[in-house]
Image (cartoon, coloured by chain):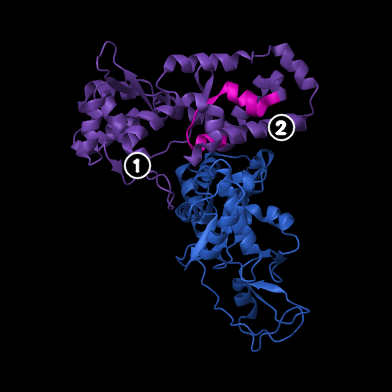
Amino acid sequence: MTQRKRLSNTQSSSQSKRQPSSLVAQEEDDDATFTQPSTSQVQRGLEKLTPAQIDQKTAEVVQYFLVKDQKKIPVRRADLVKHVVKEYRNIYPEIIKRASRTFDQVFGLKLVEIDAKTHMYILINKLETAEGISPINSPANPKMGLLFVILSVIFMKGGVVRENVIWNTLKKLRVDPGEKHEEFGDVKKLVTDEFVRQRYLEYVRIPHTEPAEYEFHWGQRADIEVSKAKILEFMGQLHEQDPQSWTQQYREAHSCPSSTQASTSSQR
Amino acid sequence: MSRQMGDSHRRFLQIMMVNGIVDEHEARTLYQHCCERHNTQHVPDKLDEFIDIINSKLQPMFMQIRKGMSEDNGQQYYALVNMAETDVTRMSSDYADNELELFRKTMDLIVNTENGKASSTDILNSADTMTTKKLKKSETEHLLNRLVSDKWLSEKRGEYTLSTRCIIEMEPYIRTMYQDQVKVCHICHNIAFQCQICEKPTCGIKIHNPCVARYFKGRAEPRCPACDDFWPHEIPEVRRPHSQSRR
């Protein structure tokens, strides 16, 4: 689709989702051209630049992340350096530091590296986003509703489910993965491709299955952004049951006080 | 009052990023919602000060929440604008090159008419003269719908106008690109597309319809504020603010 025009230039490699090995190889290839500069290199680099130049570059990096974030697409460090940072690569750590500070202080977002090996970044919302977040008519995003259902099923089934469990659940909700849905379009593609690329879900082949069978896990973004306690609360309402009655899930949901959101208030 | 941003400001900004544009009434509701949500003081008349704090932090990012009037109903709107790319390339992450070309052509058509409107037929015809990959008729229609739902264009009875968001955001670009064609409203001094024009050829000033309504309200005989000639157009009613009509 045209919406991915700019992305397709920069992230064409991520389209080849089906061959994870070649994907990794290419990423390492691209990234090899960039080595993280040392502290003293950064220091020397900064001395040669005016504050205005550094601010300008930081602003460009912030804009780049915001554009990608509209589609919830992770940003690869290699792409960021190649397309935005460019000749400022020698002060890259400083620019990332300033960009994260801006996201934190101005936008209420947190810049998170989700993969230390391939250097992927995503933006995570630090402000708690309860249901019915906005009092005005925001462009509703029905896809998020669908995602919430899928994440709930995975969580309630102990963190991993075979794909047919998800498809059967969706069919009960009259969302048939085999048919084109009015709102979601190609449901199978949305779930196994878009949500996966956005890091909400992981879709992995179960080893030694022939023909291949797949299962779903929570993705890294979901781990950080979605509150398990909220899901349990929602389940409680749905089944008219006390959330505490799901002992194991309740313990998990309340063991690590939903990571980012709880820490928000402590950070200025 | 503190000039520092708090979570109420951040939430307001996040919602602006999702919506792009909100009318004044919505902005006020949102302001109250964000303050209550984060237990900060809500002073009903201080919306603009609240936004100023956000803007002071957005400025280094070349972004701004800017206020502007709807040419259609005269209401105030707030739009989150990107000043780094004030031209059409701003839209390049959402639209393909040939789609942007069609949007530019639509803009050309609108700027070059007296009433600031372009008919769907004219836009479809202009698609024939595209230099990039041509759009089929159905593709053009689909694109126009998208431009409307993304709030770059407005549509009424098959006629397209530049939306309030588009005018607020692209005003600097429009002023430079169409220096000779674009005129400003004699009353509010913003660029004017949908407007009334003084019929005296040597005068020919433009006034936005809502500005006309406000300026001539209660005057017995409407005269041009520039040349004092008789103002021959129908004077629209002043619209009540906070009516439910939307862009």
Chain A rendered in what hue? purple
Q: CA distance from mark 1 to mark 2?
A: 40 Å
Instruction: Tell me which segment is drawn in magenta.
Output: A66-86
Query: Helix or strand or loop: what does disc 1 sit on?
Result: loop
**Main secondary-structure element of the magenta-colored stretch:** helix
Marks counted in the figure total 2
Task: State the image coordinates of residue A58 (x, y, percent, origin top left).
Answer: 67, 31
Tell me where residue B36 appears, x and y as whole percent.
46, 47
Please name the residue shown 74% across and 82% down the image.
B200
> Which residue is rendered at x = 52% and y = 68% of the image?
B241
Residue identified by numbered label 1: A184
Number of other residues with Cα within 10 Å of mark 1, as a class: few under 14, some 14 to 19, many 20 or more: some
Which one is in front in this view, the residue at disc 1 or the one at disc 2? 1
Specify whether residue B32 is painted magenta.
no
Query: Are the residues flagged by discs 1 and 2 in contact, CB closer than 8 Å?
Result: no
The image quadrant of residue A30 is top right
Residue kind at label 2, given as amino acid type: Asp
Residue, disc 2 = A55
Precedes in sequence: disc 1 or disc 2: 2
In the image, A222: left or right of B22? left
The amino acid type found where label 1 is placed reads Phe
Specify whether A257 is left or right of B99. left
Q: Chain B, which colour?
A: blue
Q: Is residue A80 a member of the stretch shown in magenta? A: yes
Secondary structure under the numbered disc 2 in the rendered image: helix
In this view, the residue in front, A174 or A50, is A174
Task: Tell me the number on the disc at residue B119.
Answer: none
Q: Residue at x 65, y 77 (%)?
A: B215
